[in-house]
Amino acid sequence: MADRTDVVVIGGGQAGLSAAYFLQRFGLGNRYLLLDHAPGPGGAWQFRWPTLTLATANGVHDLPGLGLVEALGRDCEAFPAATAVPEYFGRYEEKFGLAIRRPVSVEMVDHADDNYTDGEFAVTLGDGAVIGARAIINATGTWERPFVPYVPGIADFRGRQLHTHDYVGPDEFAGQRVLVVGAGISAVQLLIEIARHAVGVETYWCSRTEPVFDATPFDPDKGRQAVARVEERVRAGLPPTSVVSVTGLALTPSIAAARDDGILTWHRMFTRITETGVCWDCGTGPAGSDHLDVDVIFWNTGFRSSLDHLAPLRLRSSGGGITMTGRLATTVADDPRVQLLGYGPSASTIGANRAGREAARNVAEFLD
């Protein structure tokens, strides 16, 4: 592996591939290197649960230059996302000859010392090797950082706790009492799947805020407004919120049917976890009225951006986030040589494409 390059792209998901494609389009085909820690193409999609299909996934947008249907065929919506997306990404990488190395773990990005006078950054890999680079496009996403909120007593629970990240399928919950925690699309979809397909299961659902279901179509204008609100936060140096948190959840036929069948009966967030379950305002009401015994607590509480490897650059602001700038808010305000994809408004497959192009353009202009 070369120890110097102009641009290091970190992450081989949608955003990373889009950035690599446009770097080649802007004349930097032999001046970048994409590093991906996954064993094969597909980004985080290769680790998703087997029952998730392209039809039920929350949007897989076409990569620039090669559409999903063109690569996989018109019936691809029925394919499992965990195999279909890796196949699609693999064909994409091959078609455009993207400069990718995997599996490669990036442990740290820091300012280069005197040994790398031609590069402004030192990218340290898991095997100890160091690559010098003049610019960084970070596209590591969120999958590697599942978030579970702290609740008093969380370490006392004797049952099973898992996160969306760990989900395999509904059969593992057969005959159990399962509490699903979370207000996003994953929580709702998996709650329905478990309730419908796990034999003898009892399901419960709670979250910090009561979900809002929106029966109106999710048109482009609504999408733009939602993205603008997330973008406003990152431009101010605040931690990004999810787009769903500002749009609500679409009331699909599947969700409407589940609500009619009593599956989506929402409860407010519990205040403590016990050895056998959870409780609300523990001990203040009639005996037993505030406690729910469960076998499983299933956290669908989202993810955080995988940015620990950038910590030496000290990019975070006093607001807790990273202040972003540029036309599509892909540029780190304190260091324009660093582009962040999948952070804030670009945290969607369609947003990743546009952000990949913008980041590549910004880097190309900087290098020239």
Image (cartoon, helix red, strand yellow):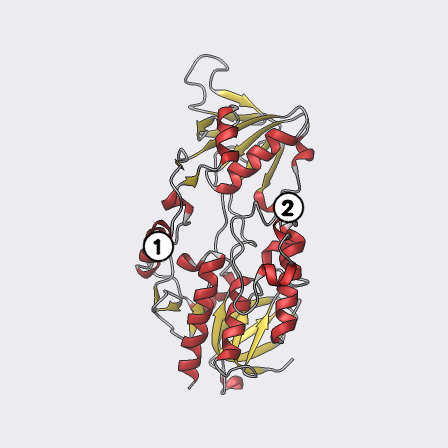
Question: Residue 347 location in percent, x, y?
Answer: 45, 57
Residue holding disc 2 = 49
Identify the secondary structure beneath mark 1: helix
Residue 132 appears in the picture as rendered = yes
Residue 158 appears in the picture as rendered = no
Q: Which residue is painted at 38% across and 51% down in the image?
A: 223
Numbered disc total: 2
Residue holding disc 1 = 224
Give the amino acid at mark 1. Answer: Arg
Image position of 28 (left or right of 235): right
Give the amino acid at mark 2. Answer: Trp
For the view shown, which residue lies furthest in the front direction?
Answer: 74
User: Where is 106 relative to 228, above or below?
Assistant: below
Question: Residue 260 location in percent, x, y?
Answer: 49, 25
Q: Nearer the viewer, residue 286 or 145?
A: 145
Q: Which residue is painted at 41% across and 66% down in the image?
A: 314
Q: Which residue is painted at 50% across and 61% down in the image?
A: 308
Q: Nearer the viewer, residue 88 or 179?
A: 88
Classify 10 Å Cα crowding around label 2: few (below 14), some (14-19), many (20 and above).
some
Question: Residue 85 location in percent, x, y?
Answer: 62, 57
Identify the secondary structure beneath mark 2: loop
Residue 102: quadrant of the picture = bottom right
